[in-house]
Image (spheres, rainbow, N blue to C red):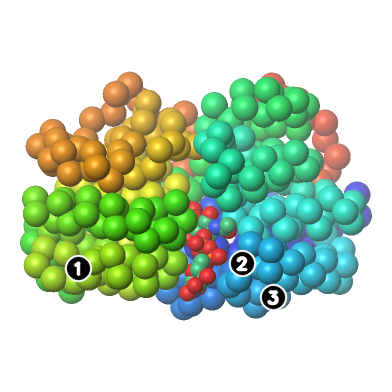
């Protein structure tokens, strides 16, 4: 390995920023040379800039500005842009996050150029190949050199896929590190007042293609949400993907329903913290509600994060079962079935990941026995 090796983080979409911040901080504390490459997959100020500010992320060393497009067009632009950046900077390791198209493109580019990679949030599986994210996860985990796993079920998925155990490390969940760091700033009152919400309210986020792209599915979903709005005021900070289709299907501000722009990280989590109920199809929000103890109804047929059901406040619903599930959740409040939160969701995943990466850069042979508990300095 070169002296003073370089680590590049490839980030493109909103959840990437949240997952990367603790890793960047952890590597910074160890004095590792690093830089962020922003692909520009998400580019609206409220989908990107606000996260750099709220999470204290350093300015990217490059922004590829790939923007939106079909899967093929977007991925093609990502491949071309990322290849140039990787060739120009010659990193010793590229770290990729989650399951978005920027992640997939980065892992492909690096595999072809022979540049080593680490995947943060390896091993999650919904076993639903109709979801673009599942395709991205499977390909990314097949090609990554270091697989950094956020929840124990990921270990068995990777073992079943034949990933050598020596590459795999259970490190905990850096998205939860970000949540813990933000916790002192999470005050529901100012945002509740700004949005004119009463004390008891629900928050919804919706953006999955399976829910919002097809007009018939969007209509069913909106009917379910409107039925919940008969029980409790709902605010929906709406992802740009769903905007047009959901509005056509009747998701418009009026009565108990308030449709707003996406919120910055701290404001959004403040709102979630004070909510009586969250309705979502987001991956990250399933995890954050588990940690905040807020009941969460996930409008999806499956989840790659079953630990938020077994160890958290999450329930899967369909648009048709949503209203009754909301009524029950509003009456019962949150309960975690196992009474235990997910292991290693303790706010220290970033430092753990940084230690695994630093040891790997030094060429230390990390044994799988070091999962979760790499030696502290
Ligand atoms: C992407 C990820 C998804 C993740 C989500 C997080 C893929 C395949 N999907 O979905 O896994 O859950 O990000 O939010 O990578 N748009 C804007 N402004 C922006 C960004 C997007 O208006 O800043 C609109 C565009 O119309 C675009 C659409 O949103 O076509 C979808 O954006 P895209 O990044 O392709 O996928 P997401 O649905 O955001
Ligand atoms: N989030 C936010 N503002 C919003 C909606 C979500 O800051 O208006 C945060 C949320 O707290 C979580 C992340 O964005 O940290 C999740 O992103 P998203 O739901 O877009 O992606 P997913 O997790 O489904 O891939």
Q: Which residue is mark 2?
A: 70
Q: Secondary structure at mark 3?
A: loop
Q: Secondary structure at mark 1?
A: strand
Q: Secondary structure at mark 2?
A: loop
Dot 1 alpha-carbon crowd within 10 angstroms: few under 14, some 14 to 19, many 20 or more: many
Place of residue 307 in the rendered image (x, y in percent of width and height, measured from the top left): 43, 30
Q: Quadrant of residue 248?
A: bottom left
In the picture provided, is 361 more to the left or to the right than 303? right
Let me know if residue 310 appears in the view: yes
Marks 1/2: CA distance? 30 Å
Give the mark toward the camera: 1 or 2: 2
| Residue pictured at 26% horizontal, 49% vertical | 278
In the picture provided, is 334 more to the left or to the right than 51? left
Work out whether residue 23 or residue 162 is closer to the camera in this orientation and state it.
Answer: 162
Place of residue 177 in the rendered image (x, y in percent of width and height, measured from the top left): 47, 48
Let me know if residue 172 appears in the view: no
Mark 2 vs ligand 1: CB below 8 Å: no
Dot 2 alpha-carbon crowd within 10 angstroms: few under 14, some 14 to 19, many 20 or more: few
Q: Earlier in the sequence, mark 3 or mark 2?
A: 3
**What label sits on residue 211 in the rendered view?**
none
Q: For the C terminus, which image quadrant?
A: top right
| Residue pictured at 65% horizontal, 48% vertical | 136
Query: Above or below — where is 330 with respect to 10?
Result: above
Q: Which residue is mark 1?
A: 258
Query: Above or below — where is 176 with respect to 226?
Result: above
Place of residue 316 in the rendered image (x, y in percent of width and height, measured from the top left): 33, 36
Marks 3/2: CA distance? 17 Å
In the picture provided, is 68 more to the left or to the right than 6? left
**What label sits on residue 64 in the rendered view?**
3
């Amino acid at each position: 390995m070169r002296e003073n090796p370089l680590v590049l983080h490839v980030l493109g979409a909103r959840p990437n920023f949240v997952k990367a911040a603790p890793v960047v901080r952890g590597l910074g504390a160890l004095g590792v040379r690093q830089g962020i490459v922003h692909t520009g997959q998400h580019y609206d100020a409220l989908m990107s800039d606000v996260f750099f500010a709220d999470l204290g992320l350093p300015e990217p060393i490059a922004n590829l500005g790939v923007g939106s497009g079909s899967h093929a067009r977007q991925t093609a632009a990502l491949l071309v842009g990322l290849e140039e950046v990787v060739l120009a900077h010659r990193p010793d390791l590229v770290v990729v996050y989650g399951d978005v198209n920027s992640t997939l493109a980065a892992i492909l580019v690096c595999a072809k150029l022979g540049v080593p990679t680490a995947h943060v949030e390896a091993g999650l599986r919904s076993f639903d190949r109709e979801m673009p994210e599942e395709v991205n996860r499977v390909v990314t985990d097949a090609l990554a050199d270091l697989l950094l796993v956020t929840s124990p079920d990921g270990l068995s998925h990777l073992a079943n896929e034949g990933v050598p155990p020596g590459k795999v490390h259970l490190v905990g969940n850096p998205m939860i590190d970000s949540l813990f760091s933000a916790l002192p700033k999470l005050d529901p009152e100012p945002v509740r007042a700004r949005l004119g919400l009463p004390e008891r309210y629900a928050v919804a986020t919706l953006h999955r293609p399976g829910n919002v792209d097809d007009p018939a599915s969007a209509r069913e979903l909106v009917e379910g949400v409107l039925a919940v709005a008969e029980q409790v005021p709902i605010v929906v900070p709406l992802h740009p993907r769903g905007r047009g289709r959901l509005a056509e299907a009747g998701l418009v501000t009026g009565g108990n329903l308030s449709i707003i722009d996406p919120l910055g990280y701290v404001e959004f989590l403040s709102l979630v913290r004070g909510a009586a109920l969250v309705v979502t199809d987001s991956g990250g929000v399933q995890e954050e509600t588990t940690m905040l103890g807020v009941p969460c109804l996930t409008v999806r047929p499956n989840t790659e994060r079953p630990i938020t059901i077994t160890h958290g406040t999450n329930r899967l619903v369909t648009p048709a079962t949503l209203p009754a599930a909301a009524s029950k959740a509003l009456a019962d409040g949150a309960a975690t079935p196992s009474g235990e939160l997910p292991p290693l969701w303790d706010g220290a995943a970033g430092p753990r990941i940084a230690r695994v990466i630093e040891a790997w850069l030094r060429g230390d042979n990390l044994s799988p026995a070091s999962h979760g508990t790499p030696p502290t300095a």
